[in-house]
Image: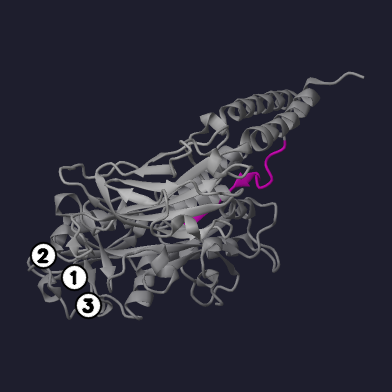
Amino acid sequence: MSVSWGSLAAILGLAVPVAAALWEFVLAGRKRLGYRVQLDTTIRDSAASGPDTTVLQRMQWDGTNLRDPSVVLLRIENAGWRPLVAADYVAPANDPVGIRIAFPGRRVVGMTVTERSTQVPPTFFVPGAEGFETTGRVISLPKVILNRRAHYKVLAVLDREEGFSDPEFPEPEVSAGVVGGVRGGNIKKTAYYPFASRQVRWLLASLILVSATQSAFTLAGGDEAAPLDCTTGTLHLSGSTAFAPVLREAAKRYEETCPKAHIPLTATSFKGSVDGLGTLAAAGADARLPDGRGLGSRLTFSDGPKSDGRPRLLPRPVALSLFTLVVHQDAGVEDLSLKQVRDIYAGTVTNWSQVRGNDVPIHLVSRNPGSGTRTTLEQQVLDGGGPPRVTTADCAGLDRDRPGRCEVGSTGTLLDTVAATPGALGHSEVGAAAAHDDVRQIRIDGYPATLEGADQGAYPYWQTEIAYTYGEPPADSIAAGFLRYLADEVGKDIVRAEGHRPCSELDKPLLCRPSTS
């Protein structure tokens, strides 16, 4: 009986990972000492930079002020498959020290062991224990007995050495070794899983070659079926300008993955949430679909729920989207209370000096009505209130000596206008604002625009990004396939990369609950 080249490649494809696992975890993995730097941070004001960086609160140690304190947390672990005993450490028998950790540019002012596996004896770390001490910039750790997967953590408080002027500190230097250990026995920095040895990397390279060979034989045999969520046809996207960067990248990647799918996008594809909902409703009405059938060629994305009166538009929460207030650099403010924000939009505060800023009139730059970013501002921040009347139809016509307000059609135009208009205040999706160097983001009640703050209820300016379909799209339609793609790992990576958070990853997923309207 003859064996085809494709079958041989499949057999090799199975044998290579088995051989790699046997080598790594049975032969080479017998002894391995590892460490991780889980925290290495200075105690400075992260909002400042350069020479003006300051310590948030002066820190003392034994009554002495620290010049530039920092904290380092290291995890020492047995990353192999055999226990480590005192005789395994590469050190003279009469030397009680098993591991030394040096901090270039810093001196150690204090340390402690904050966590240890239950089987690690505490006597190794009591005051006065042999091998457990600090000297200058070095921490010494004893020859701790570590069973398989056992670990302990060392927390060190450090201060900058006199004469060390570099703004950033080098990484800690960890020195240790085990007799008969993997890769020379030296202690290695590990990730969540220790990385493979050089031999295993060669085996993995062989696996890639085998897979490529098998793919070549498969492709030579004819066209392969498309991936599971690939569909054919044309998909029209519309809606939120704030979510547009996600959709443009996702559409590009989806077309690369699914060659028979087409998602045409133009400069006017995304004109706002309300416009997108109207476009979807009109397309569905024109299609004259009977009840129970949905439109499979269109999706619209909205910053928040639809209004009443469109029962055939069905919501699917996609992500939590963050928004932020942005100001021109000369406003002189970085933080506003919720009351101050409302007073500004109510027109009772018209100059930045009234909120401890510079003596500059406030110019409000708003999105057009129907924008999800604006609607979210009015609902979540202004408590249902709206901005004052428009004073000029063209933002270029704002009087720089008097307060005023104008409206623009997109997030990009708003950011450019705020950057070019002294005293301007606007609102934007966080990812776009962060990429615009000429505007400053505003904290609300001391809280910056972070996903954690929104998830915990501390930061108010956020909204659920919702995908709407006209009825329930057919399971094999391009609309259904694209929605599955956004919920898959590649789609979620794209969502996260643009500063949003997939609903499935939130600590409180109910924040992403769909509208009941």
Residue 314 in the image, given as x and y percentages of width and height = 59, 68
Residues 456 and 109: in front is: 109
Which numbered marker is on residue 116? none
> In the rendered structure, are the residues bearing label 1 and label 3 in contact, judged by CB atoms less than 8 Å apart?
no
Mark 2 vs mark 1, CA separation in Å: 9 Å
Residue reaching furthest front?
94
How busy is the neighbourhood of tag 3: few (under 14 within 10 Å), some, or many (20 plus)? some
* Residue beneath the point at 51% across and 65% down: 506
> In the rendered structure, are the residues bearing label 2 and label 1 in contact, judged by CB atoms less than 8 Å apart?
yes
How busy is the neighbourhood of tag 2: few (under 14 within 10 Å), some, or many (20 plus)? some
Residue under label 3, please give it.
340
Mark 1 vs mark 3, CA separation in Å: 21 Å
Dot 3 or dot 2, earlier in sequence? 3
Q: Which residues are magenta?
A: 225-238
Residue under label 1, please give it.
391
Residue 438 in the image, given as x and y percentages of width and height = 21, 52
> In the rendered structure, are the residues bearing label 3 and label 2 in contact, judged by CB atoms less than 8 Å apart?
no
